[in-house]
């Protein structure tokens, strides 16, 4: 029996490195999954690999309130209920000092990484409350724990969702909705490649993995293992907390 047997999960950022890995793993653990992303073609490709009865996709921008309400309604309609959500869509913004960065970039990063999580919680909580509970996992970052020079917008956004998560978790204890955040370190995906390339152009030299005690980046599957634990009933006493998965980086 799978660890998510009978559960319905929504995953945002599901066309990306961590989200697509989570979708595959959650389906293999028995969940029905609605994959959400703004990259419609990539999203369809990921979904097409999965058993059609267990997976469907919804293409849209998670910063849009109507879109968010619509994908939560879509999952409920298709699969009957929503038990789990990974609010995982995110962007890195641009590398640079605060005084050189554009306000438009800051606003965009905050919209995708913070506003979308707010909208997701607002849409999911009433649905989960009505169904008797659920588990929501928000993807923060090690950049939500410590400062990230030249990535201040990203770091600000990843700290912000930790405050949101803690407040929402306390609000939702009577509803049996558990809400947690995970804080991955550097993980091999498009987003990390993009940050590394921008840092290289900005003058960084040397191997960025050298700063990680384990000496390597994570594979997305190592992040998803923690998401799976927090999504499943195995984490029944976990709420309002952050979980590092960072190869020792924050130690
Ligand atoms: N890769 C890392 O090293 C790392 C480390 C810590 C945290 N994270 C976080 O993990 C999450 C997943 O990132 P990833 O590494 O898989 O990167 P990724 O770029 O592969 O995936 C991110 C996905 O989010 C989607 N997305 C972005 N904006 C969207 C929007 N407005 N509406 C809908 N979808 C949107 C993208 O299309 C993409 O498919 C992000 O929140 C990221 O900040 C990543």
Image (spheres, rainbow, N blue to C red):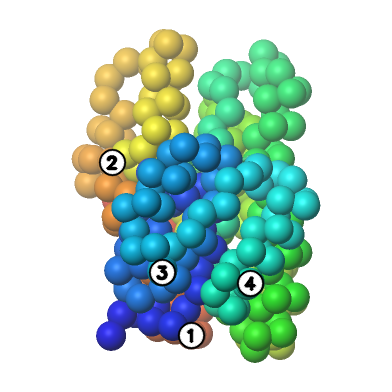
Which residue, as the protein is rendered here, is positioned at the far front?
A: 52
Does dot 3 land on a helix, a strand or a loop?
Answer: loop
Q: Nearer the viewer, mark 4 or mark 1?
A: 4
- Near-viewer residue (148 or 131): 131
Identify the disc placed on residue 36: none
Counting labels gives 4
Left or right of 43, for residue 49: left
Asked if one can make out residue 184 in the rendered structure from this viewpoint, the answer is no
- At x 27%, y 34%, the residue is 209
- At x 38%, y 44%, the residue is 45
Q: Give the percent coordinates (x, y) of residue 31.
A: 41, 73
Question: Residue 223's image quarter?
Answer: bottom left
Identify the disc placed on residue 217: 2
- At x 41%, y 69%, the residue is 53
Q: Tell me how far mark 1 sits from mark 2, CA to CA.
A: 29 Å
Q: Is residue 200 above or below residue 52?
A: above
Q: Tell me how far mark 1 sits from mark 3, CA to CA.
A: 28 Å
Q: Tell me how far mark 4 sits from mark 2, CA to CA.
A: 39 Å
Q: Are marks 1 and 2 in contact (CB under 8 Å)?
A: no
Question: Residue 42's image quarter?
Answer: top left
Q: Tell me how far mark 4 sits from mark 1, CA to CA.
A: 26 Å
Q: Nearer the viewer, mark 4 or mark 2?
A: 4
Asked if one can make out residue 211 in the rendered structure from this viewpoint, the answer is yes
Identify the disc placed on residue 236: 1
- Residue hosting label 3: 53
- Residue hosting label 4: 77
Q: Is residue 5 above or below residue 188?
A: below
Which residue, as the protein is rendered here, is positioned at the far left?
A: 215
Q: Give the percent coordinates (x, y) of residue 27.
A: 36, 67
Q: Tell me how far mark 3 sits from mark 2, CA to CA.
A: 34 Å
Cβ of disc 2 within 8 Å of ligand 1? Answer: yes
Does dot 2 land on a helix, a strand or a loop?
Answer: loop
């Amino acid at each position: 029996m799978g660890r998510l047997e009978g559960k319905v999960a929504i995953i945002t950022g599901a066309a990306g490195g961590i989200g697509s890995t989570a979708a595959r793993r959650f389906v293999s653990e028995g969940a029905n999954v609605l994959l959400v992303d703004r990259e419609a073609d990539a999203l369809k490709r990921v979904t097409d690999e999965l058993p059609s009865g267990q997976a469907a996709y919804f293409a849209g921008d998670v910063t849009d309130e109507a879109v968010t309400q619509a994908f939560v309604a879509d999952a409920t309609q298709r699969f009957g209920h929503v038990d789990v959500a990974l609010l995982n869509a995110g962007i890195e913004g641009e590398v640079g000092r605060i005084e050189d960065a554009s306000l438009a970039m800051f606003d965009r990063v905050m919209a995708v990484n913070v506003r979308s999580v707010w909208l997701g919680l607002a849409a999911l909580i009433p649905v989960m409350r009505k169904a008797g509970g659920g588990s929501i996992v928000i993807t923060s970052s090690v950049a939500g724990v410590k400062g990230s020079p030249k990535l201040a917008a990203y770091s600000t956004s990843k700290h912000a969702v930790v405050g949101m998560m803690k407040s929402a978790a306390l609000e939702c204890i009577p509803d049996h909705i558990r809400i947690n955040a995970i804080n991955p370190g550097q993980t091999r995906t498009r987003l990390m490649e993009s940050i590394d390339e921008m840092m290289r152009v900005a003058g960084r030299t040397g191997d960025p993995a050298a700063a990680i005690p384990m000496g390597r980046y994570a594979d997305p599957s190592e992040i998803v293992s923690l998401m799976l634990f927090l999504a499943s009933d195995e984490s029944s006493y976990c709420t309002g907390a952050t979980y590092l998965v960072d190869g020792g980086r924050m130690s």
